Amino acid sequence: MGKVKIKKKETRIDMTAMSDVTVLLLTFFMLTSTFLQKEPVQVITPPSVSEKKVPDSKLMSVLVAQDGKVYLELLGTKDSTLKSEDLREAVLKKAVAKYNATHTNKVNLTAKHVEAFRKSNAFGVPISNMTKWLDMPVDERDKALKTAGIPIEENFDLTRPTEFQIWVQAVYDALEDAGAADDMKKGTGIAIKADAGTPYERVQVVMNNLQTIKMNKFSLMTALKKEE
């Protein structure tokens, strides 16, 4: 008697639904993620046990390199109230106006300069060299930052602000115009990120400059200390 052959069925898993879910998840993370921005210098922060997070909007970060050079990074609001690009443009125009009011070597911005600054992340060159820096290709700008830095020195005279103080006041004014300066008043909108090897005296100069213009509250960025 012959054996009955049972027809084998093809084992097949439909991956269409899984592919759809994967694409949706990828799109979600791309739209909601905050990408790390390139910094002009490498800053390795000292460790601490504090777990308090620095806000990711309405923030002015002050980078203090190991050699003492100072740079600024700006983040606007998460919504359309004041985007980072718009904040940078407003800050640039206000800072240059403040500088021109107290210096004889005037700085003249063009629309091209403003657009280049809008797209920049961190910045830190003397205001007198700002237009020359913005005229450079992007890769050359990054190289120039490493040897520049925002001019800053010990100063307690409000009638003669340092360039660092001019920039900070311009940031505050731009946020205030947009009704978003509360975080800077409370201190959560200002973060100092200094390298672990930066001399404390240099960080002290930055803090003194802030306090001179009534910015008495700010955060110090650190890395989370590992348990031994």
Image: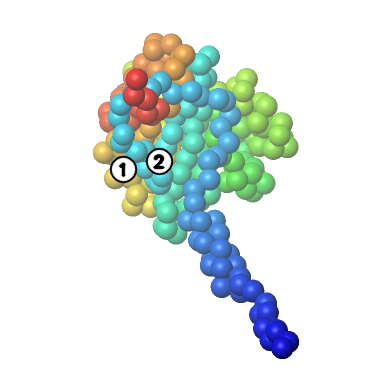
Q: Identify the mark nearer the N-term, 2 or 1.
A: 2
Neighbourhood count class around disc 1 (C-alpha, 10 Å): few under 14, some 14–19, many 20 upward: some
Horizontal and vertical percent for residue 34?
49, 48
Q: CA distance from mark 2 to mark 1?
A: 8 Å
Q: Residue at x 40, y 27 (%)?
A: 223
Q: Residue 167 appears at what percent x and percent y? A: 46, 33
Residue, x 40% and y 41% (percent of image)?
59
| Quadrant of residue 122 within the rendered picture | top right
Q: Helix, strand, or loop for circle 1?
A: helix
Q: Is residue 129 left or right of residue 178?
A: right
Give 70 or 163, whichever is nearer the viewer.
70
> Label 2: how many residues lie within 10 Å, few (<14), some (14-19) or many (20+)?
many
User: Which disc, if any, is residue 183?
Assistant: 1
Judging depth in this view, the residue of 1 and 116 nearest the camera is 1
Q: Given contact means CB atoms under 8 Å apart, are the residues at marks 2 and 1 in contact?
A: yes
Q: Amino acid at mark 2?
A: Leu
Q: Amino acid at mark 1?
A: Asp
**Mark number for residue 59?**
2
From what the image shows, is residue 19 above or below residue 168? below
- In percent of the image, x 67 and y 27: which residue is there? 143
Relative side of 196 to 122, left or right: left
- Answer yes or no: is residue 126 visible: no
- Percent x, y for residue 176? 35, 47
